[in-house]
Amino acid sequence: DLLMKTNELLNNYPEVLAKYQEKFKYILVDEYQDTNNSQYLIVKSLSDKYQNICVVGDDAQSIYSFRGANINNIINFRNDYDEVEVFRLEQNYRSTKNIVNAANSVIDHNKNKIDKEVWTDNDFGDKVEVIANESDIAEARSLCQKIVSFDNTNFSNVAILYRTNAQSRPIEDSLRLNKIPYQIFGGVSFYNRKEIKDVLAYLRVIVNSSDEESLKRIINYPARGIGQVTINKIILAANKNDLTLYETIQKNNHLSIGLSNSVSIKLQNFTDLIDVFKIQNQKLNAFDLTKEVIEKVKLIDELKKDDSPEGISRVENVQELLNGIRDFIEDQKEIVDSNNNLSEFLSTVSLSTDFDIENEDQDKVSLMTLHLSKGLEFKHVFIVGLEEDLFPSALSYNTRSELEEERRLFYVGITRAKENLYLSYANSRYRWGNIIYCEESRFLNEIDKEYVKIITPNPVKSNISRSLSPGKNITYISKLNLKRMSKTSSSRPSIKINVTEGDNVSHEKFGRGEVIKIEGSGNDSKAIINFKKFGVKNLLLRFAKLNKV
């Protein structure tokens, strides 16, 4: 309203416009690349008489079109005013030469831009590392290993950047596993997000109907016509009769609570729904039950009512919760005598939230979306999930301008790094609990090869070439079956490996260890392994994600 009414005032009342043109004879606008059309018109009207206007901005960092920002405001500035002078501030004081040159080589692929050549007097520094990983879990573990290897570096000097909020889940899990404190910049940790807490509340009530905080959270979400007055009556009746809230709801017809017949029916429908889930919990694993809960209560339909970027992010978070539960089930398969039921999963979530509380005041690694990183700088920067359909986003393929904004977002991420930049992608990741095979981002091919070092933690599994072919760009060799629209499956294929006692091995989750003992044979073969950081684990070899070291 402030912008709209101001425009109406200046357009409809010439005397008011004249007054403010005299009042503001000299105008300075910062971050001009982020102005929207309404702001542009206000500035244009006020500066039209004297044309004493100075704008500061970087078109290469225009990344907020979803908020209405228009890059053409700064691109076309020279056409809007007479006798325009352009002062290019091209020296970078933050990053090494390799990082600056890598950023330049990426942004050069955009056509709609103001030409400039950013440079720096800083040292060349380390090359930009491009890291291929078998999965998103392996990607998370790889960056944790790298963080731990840094010498004399505070965690606060490290940032992990991603395209969407939902990508933080496997990274958070791995950081917690490695006892690396972290903070979500401009947000909350994955399991503390509202939509995740809503799903978990349903799961907790299924496991323990006496969990009254969870029950109160979900009894009318999504809305089913059970208001706060009804809930208050149930609370009073529960206290009076020394019952739990759930028991009170079940017995409300016999307790004279004073509820209408229609409300009693709604409460009965709610407890019937939970009781059905309780029966299914005896047969289904944590993933299948959670998927059933999300579908039956129509949670995704509820979230999709908000089609804003924030609403889309909430749907992605619920999707990522399912992915996390699928990962949990795959991990449980490896461990002898483990189970994959809902109670076990909720126990791991409780440990996760406890970790967040315990590490409140520590020096921490920063996790954030690429959009939130604008204006910040860190010694060591990781940009993860550099895969087609993820970064660039699948939503950006409609027009060239959308794809160019994704490229500008990548440029912003690169230029956050002062000393070291790590770019990583996964060959596979889960979507809605089904595994999909990924194709590395086109942006990686746009970086000049002379500024890049290729890292392949597992050469056999990686689909990135160690050798670089002649020419300007990196050459990637994709697996024949890694097409963008690959068929999906419900779980990652098991890795069969022959190990013997005394072998040194590496595990996707637990890191390095030594095989102490082999037991059983065939599909029942087990390995007792002493991991350096996680102690002794008893793993089923047919499921264990092991590699010999």
Image (spheres, helix red, strand yellow):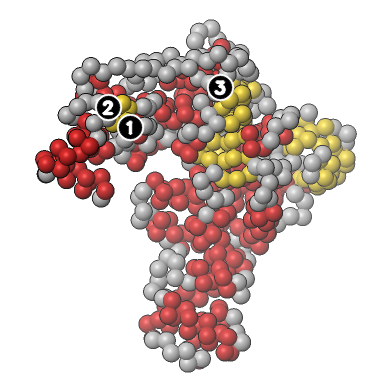
Q: In this view, does 228 lie above or below 488?
A: below
Q: Which residue is at a point 59% across and 66% down the rendered structure image?
A: 204
- Image quadrant assignment for residue 167: top right
Q: Where is residue 87 in the image (x, y as percent from the top left)?
A: 36, 17
Looking at the rendered structure, the number of numbered marks drawn on it comes to 3
* Residue 72 to residue 125: above or below: below
Q: Do the residues labelled 2 and 1 touch (CB within 8 Å)?
A: yes
Question: What x and y, as percent, mark residue 398?
Answer: 32, 32
Q: Which of 475 and 539 is in front in this view?
A: 475
User: In whole angstroms, how far apart are the C-alphas of marks 2 and 1?
Assistant: 8 Å
Q: How crowded is mark 1: few (under 14 residues within 10 Å), some or many (20 or more)?
A: few
Pointer 2: what residue? 53
Of tags 2 and 3, the one toward the viewer is 2
Task: Name the element at disc 2.
Answer: strand
Which residue is pictured at 64% across the width and 28% down the height?
461
Mark pair 1, 3: CA separation: 26 Å
Residue annotated with mark 3: 95
Where disc 1 sits, the SS reads strand
Q: What residue type is labelled 1?
A: Val
**Labels 1 and 3: the sequence-earlier one:** 1
What SS does tag 3 mark? loop
Q: Which amino acid does label 2 sit on?
A: Ile
Give residue 419's position: percent from left, percent from top. 61, 23
Residue at label 1?
A: 29
Q: Which of marks 2 and 1 is nearer the N terminus?
A: 1
Q: Nearer the viewer, mark 1 or mark 3?
A: 1
* Mark sitting on residue 381: none
